[in-house]
Amino acid sequence: MTDFMRKFVHKVDVTSVRAVTYAAIFTFVTAILTIVAFSTPNWLVADNRQPIKRFEKLGLWEACFYTFRDVNYLYDREFRGCKWLFDEDYAFLLDFLEPPFFIATQVLYTIGFIFLLVACIGVLAIQLCFVIDREIFAMKVLSITMFLAALFTTIAVLIFGIRGDDRDWMPDHDHNFLSWSYGLAVVGVFFEWMSAILFWAESRILYKKELKREQQMFNMEPTNIKA
């Protein structure tokens, strides 16, 4: 463990509020941010200053166009409004709408979202429902779960941040920018890492307290002295 982590664990240990309380708060704040980012179509947005308005905005599962005609589409048809990416009207546009990097973003962010939901269920179970004997183990499990959630979502937002405004993807890339849904996803990633660290710190604190308690009990045991 690095010096930074030792200092962090010590600082959390001396506070009056347990680290798990902060970790639970961060977990549920992250869940709210991630749900909003997951479901809103504002990851990539046009600035409305393009000469011909074609692309409007895009989310993980929804795309919006003003007036868009794919040159590879066999029929003379314009696409307008907002629709689910897998809507039958977009069936012929899937190769355009779903390049490999965007599929990777969707899959990785969804996996991270699932891990986050599992962590939320675990926190609720611990705080509201169950009295657990192996609290150290539970904190480690939550820490690992949040670490995996943070890892997958971090990779997802990095991929989209690098490739989302690619000139070979959405039209008028010079007028497109990463918007607030993507920003919420990034903030959510930060809180996921903080939650993972705090759950781990709580497990270390409980482990140290358990060792101290065992040492005290050992020291209190009577010593047999042979005559």
Image (cartoon, helix red, strand yellow):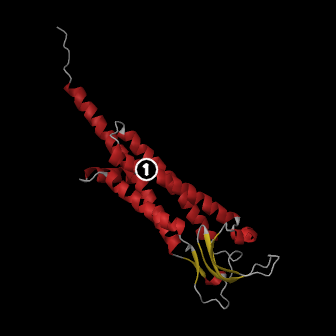
Horizontal side of residue 57 vs 134, given as left or right: right
Residue located 69% across and 77% down the image: 167
* Picture coordinates of residue 50, whole percent (x, y): 64, 89
Which residue extends farthest front?
Answer: 88
- Residue 56 coordinates in the image, percent (x, y): 61, 81
Question: Which quadrant is home to the C terminus?
Answer: top left
Instruction: Examine the rendering and report whether any part of residue 151 can be seen.
Output: no
Find the residue positioned furthest to the right. Answer: 74
- 211 relative position to 106: left or right: left
Q: Which residue is mark 1?
A: 121
On the rendered structure, is 42 left or right of 215? right
How far across and how far down the image is residue 93, in percent? 73, 71
Q: Answer whether residue 57 is visible to the viewer in this image.
A: yes
Nearest the eye: 153 or 6: 153
Instruction: Tell me: 123 left or right of 108.
Output: left
Q: Where 174 falls versus 85 (above or below)?
A: below
How crowded pointer 1 is (Cα within 10 Å; few <14, some 14-19, many 20+) is rated as: few
Q: Is residue 156 above or below residue 49?
A: above
Q: Which residue, as the protein is rendered here, is positioned at the far top?
A: 227
- Per the image, label 1 sits on a secondary structure element best described as helix
Q: Please name the residue shown 61% across and 62% down the image.
A: 106
**Disc 1 marks which amino acid?**
Ile
| Position in image of residue 61 (x %, y %) | 60, 67
